[in-house]
C-alpha cells in the first residue's frame, strides 16, 4: 500500500555479504514503519548506516547512524551522501517524479544495485490501473530501464495500516466503523518485511527477483477487528458504514480524494474474496510470517493507551 510521507533508502555494498564497516545509506521522511526495524537490523549486522532526512534533528536515529540533510524528491540534494555507496534500498513514496533522475545519479556516483520497496498492487495489474499500482509500476519501470542490478519487493497490506485506521476508534470504544466489512487482506508484519529487505541488502542471491510478500492468513476487516479484541481482551466489533460516508470521513482527515477513491475501490474489489497469501517471507527467511494476532500483541499499547 502506498504510504505517503514515509521514505527509506539504504545503500551498502553488493557482493555476497556486506562486510563490517561497509558504508550504508538510508533516508528517512519523518518516521518509518519499515525503516526503523530495517536500520536496526542493518546495525546489528555490522553495517554502517548513513541516513538522509529533510530534518536531521527530528530523525531520531539510533547511535552510530550518520545523518545527512537532503530531499529524495530533489536528487541533487543527496548527491554528496551517495559517496562510497553501492547498494540502495528505495521506497518511492516521496520521490514524486524523480525516480529516473535519482537512479541515474546513483549510477553515476557508483551505486550498482537497488532493492526497491514496491507494492503487491503492481502484481494484480488491475484494469483500469489504480493509483497505487500506477505509481509503483512507474518506479519499477525506471529501475528496470537503468543499468543497475535490482531486487523488487512487492508487499501487500501492512498490518500497521490498521493501527492508523482503527486505533483511535478502539481507544474510544468497542465499535469500529468503516466500509466493506467482508473485504480481505493478508496483513504483513513490518518486522518481517524489514527482515526480508535486510536479507536482500546483505547478499546478492536474489538479484533480478520480484519477491511477493504477505502475512500468513487472509482476514476480513471484521475478523481483524475481532482479532484485536481477542488480543487486548475487549468485545470489539466492526460496524459497516456506506462507502460514501467513509470517503467523507477520510477526506475530512486529510487523505487526498484520489487516494481515498483508490482505497475504496480496492476494498470493494476484495469484498467476499480471499486475499492472496504469498510465500516470499517463508522463501527468504525460512520461517512462516508472523500472524496478525502476533502483530497486534506487539502493538497492543497503541490500541489501549
Image: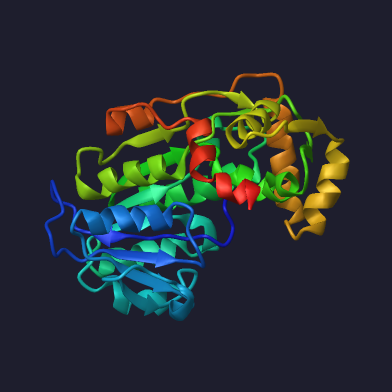
On screen, residue 264 versus residue 282, left or right, reads right
Colouring style: rainbow
Which residue: 71% across, 48% down? 171
Which residue: 33% across, 41% down? 196
Which residue: 36% across, 61% down? 103
- Depth order, front residue of 189/89: 189
Q: Position of residue 51 (x, y in %)?
A: 35, 69
- Depth order, front residue of 77/251: 251
**76 shown above or below 113:** below
Q: Position of residue 255 (x, y in %)?
A: 73, 56
Q: Quick one: which residue is furthest to the front in this view?
A: 233
Which residue: 37% across, 35% down? 211
Number of callouts: 0
Residue 177 visible in image: yes
Q: Position of residue 147 (x, y in %)?
A: 28, 54
**249 shown above or below 225:** below
Residue 147 visible in image: no
- Depth order, front residue of 79/5: 5
Question: Considering the image in quadrants, where does the N terminus appear?
Answer: top right
On screen, residue 264 versus residue 63, left or right, reads right
Q: Quadrant of residue 290?
A: top left
Q: Position of residue 22 (x, y in %)?
A: 16, 63
**124 shown above or below 261:** above
On screen, residue 188 versus residue 254, left or right, reads left
Q: Quadrant of residue 50?
A: bottom left
Q: Quadrant of residue 152?
A: top left
Amino acid at each position: 500500500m502506498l504510504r505517503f510521507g514515509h521514505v527509506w533508502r539504504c545503500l551498502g555494498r553488493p557482493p555476497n555479504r556486506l562486510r563490517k564497516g561497509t558504508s550504508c545509506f538510508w533516508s528517512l521522511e519523518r518516521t518509518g514503519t519499515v525503516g526503523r526495524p530495517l536500520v536496526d537490523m542493518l546495525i546489528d549486522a555490522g553495517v554502517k548506516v548513513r541516513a538522509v532526512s529533510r530534518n536531521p534533528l527530528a530523525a531520531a536515529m539510533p547511535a552510530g547512524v550518520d545523518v545527512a540533510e537532503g530531499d529524495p524528491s530533489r536528487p541533487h540534494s543527496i548527491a554528496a551522501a551517495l559517496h562510497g555507496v553501492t547498494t540502495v534500498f528505495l521506497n518511492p513514496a516521496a520521490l514524486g517524479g524523480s525516480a529516473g533522475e535519482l537512479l541515474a545519479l546513483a549510477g553515476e556516483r557508483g551505486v550498482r544495485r537497488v532493492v526497491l520497496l514496491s507494492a503487491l498492487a503492481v502484481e494484480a495489474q488491475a484494469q483500469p490501473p489504480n493509483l497505487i499500482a500506477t505509481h509503483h509500476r512507474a518506479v519499477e519501470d525506471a529501475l528496470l530501464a537503468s543499468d543497475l542490478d535490482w531486487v523488487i519487493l512487492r508487499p501487500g497490506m501492512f498490518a500497521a495500516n490498521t493501527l492508523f485506521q482503527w486505533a483511535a476508534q478502539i481507544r474510544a470504544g468497542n465499535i469500529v466503523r468503516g466500509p466493506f466489512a467482508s473485504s480481505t487482506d493478508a496483513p504483513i508484519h513490518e518486522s518481517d518485511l524489514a527482515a526480508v529487505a535486510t536479507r536482500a541488502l546483505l547478499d546478492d542471491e536474489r538479484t533480478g527477483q520480484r519477491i511477493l510478500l504477505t502475512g500468513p492468513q487472509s482476514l476480513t476487516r471484521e475478523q481483524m477487528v475481532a482479532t484485536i479484541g481477542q488480543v487486548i481482551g475487549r468485545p470489539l466489533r466492526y460496524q459497516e458504514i456506506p462507502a460514501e460516508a467513509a470517503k467523507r470521513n477520510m477526506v475530512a482527515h486529510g487523505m487526498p480524494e484520489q487516494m481515498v477513491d483508490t482505497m475504496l475501490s480496492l476494498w470493494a474489489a476484495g469484498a467476499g474474496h480471499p486475499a492472496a497469501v504469498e510465500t516470499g517471507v517463508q522463501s527468504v527467511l525460512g520461517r512462516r510470517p508472523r500472524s496478525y494476532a502476533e502483530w497486534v500483541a506487539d502493538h497492543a499499547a497503541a490500541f489501549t493507551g
